[in-house]
Amino acid sequence: MTTADPIERTLSRSGYRLTNPRRAVLDTMRVLGNHFTAEEVQVASPTVGRATVFRTMKLMRELGVICQVVLDDGTAVYQLADDDQADHHHHVICTECGRVTEFASDGLEGELERVATSTGFDIDTHRLELYGRCSDCDA
Amino acid sequence: MTTADPIERTLSRSGYRLTNPRRAVLDTMRVLGNHFTAEEVQVASPTVGRATVFRTMKLMRELGVICQVVLDDGTAVYQLADDDQADHHHHVICTECGRVTEFASDGLEGELERVATSTGFDIDTHRLELYGRCSDCDA
DNA sequence: TCTCTACTTGATACACAGTATCGATACGGA
DNA sequence: TCCGTATCGATACTGTGTATCAAGTAGAGA
């Protein structure tokens, strides 16, 4: 089964099958776009079983296709990863409308590296989220 | 009811009553110390009802007595806040043994401030967690 | 010290997010 | 076309936390 879609190619290149439920979940996530919960994907993909939605979302997370964003109340939302920031980035979350933006900063990474060595830990990774109001909501 | 305990004084100063269940939960958290889940507090406080354990932990979080730490798998653990870093700090989490250490860095905060303005968001707060192996586990 | 009452508690039911199980289905290579 | 295995859907289950509500109690005032 051939496809031009980069995400679908990531799937099949990783040895996963390209099934209709997976395509349906993927399409749904593309429609929902900027940020969505697992439940929103579910209700927007009525032909796909609940377990499959979660399984597919977990798979996409492992493949780096979507990324998890932890809101300040501790709940999780998801979003499709930007192609050009697929490797390492952070999130800015609007606490008003929920909009999520990705960013990366070399200066920040350098500072984090310095802090990491000062902790005495052997740091593998980190998670950073900024919370505030986006330009639309910041009237 | 007078008390010399600083946390208990924080409670009563904030207008909350000093009850035996609250004391019991507090004692348990002190025994568990560095990091604990809500469930661990529950089983270690058998005289206190489940709902009260959650209620008390939520209250302690609001008062800044304990702080929530999000592990890299998304689950939450808690720890008593250091007195001297009660205002703003971050966490380093050992992915091996679960040990949690707090740290603060002015350089980092400055860099975060710079990044925050560049996002176009009006940033209120942020969450940062470092994951790695502590000196004991990094054999 | 006694009383009163708003705050707090425990039991229970509920909610939400995600996982495990398992028989049925379908993809895709031989 | 056949077959093994990945995948699916239905369902039950788990973990973490909240809502409800009748009963208990801290602690301020008499």
Image (spheres, coloured by chain):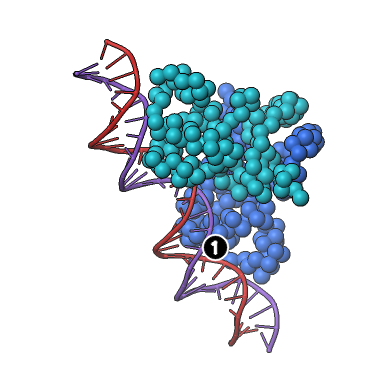
Chain colours: A cyan, B blue, C red, D purple
Q: Is residue B36 left or right of residue C23?
A: right
In the image, what residue occupies the spot 75% across and 48% down? A138
Q: Is residue B124 left or right of residue C12?
A: right
Q: Quadrant of residue A35?
A: top right
Image quadrant holding the N terminus of chain B, namely: bottom right
Q: Quadrant of residue B119?
A: top right
Find numbered disc 1 in the image and state the secondary structure of the residue it sits on: helix
Residue A36 at what x, y percent from top left? 55, 42
Residue A3 at what x, y percent from top left? 46, 20
Residue A20 at what x, y percent from top left? 39, 31
Q: Nearer the viewer, residue A135 or A117?
A: A135
Q: Does residue B110 show up?
A: yes
In the image, what residue occupies the spot 74% across and 43% down? A135
- Where C9 falls versus A61 (above or below)? below
Q: Nearer the viewer, residue B131 or B17?
A: B131
Q: What residue is pinned by disc 1?
A: B21
The amino acid sitting under disc 1 is Pro
Residue B86 at what x, y percent from top left? 72, 48
Q: Quadrant of residue A52?
A: top left
- Where B55 falls versus B72 (above or below)? below
In the image, what residue occupies the spot 50% across and 45% down? A40
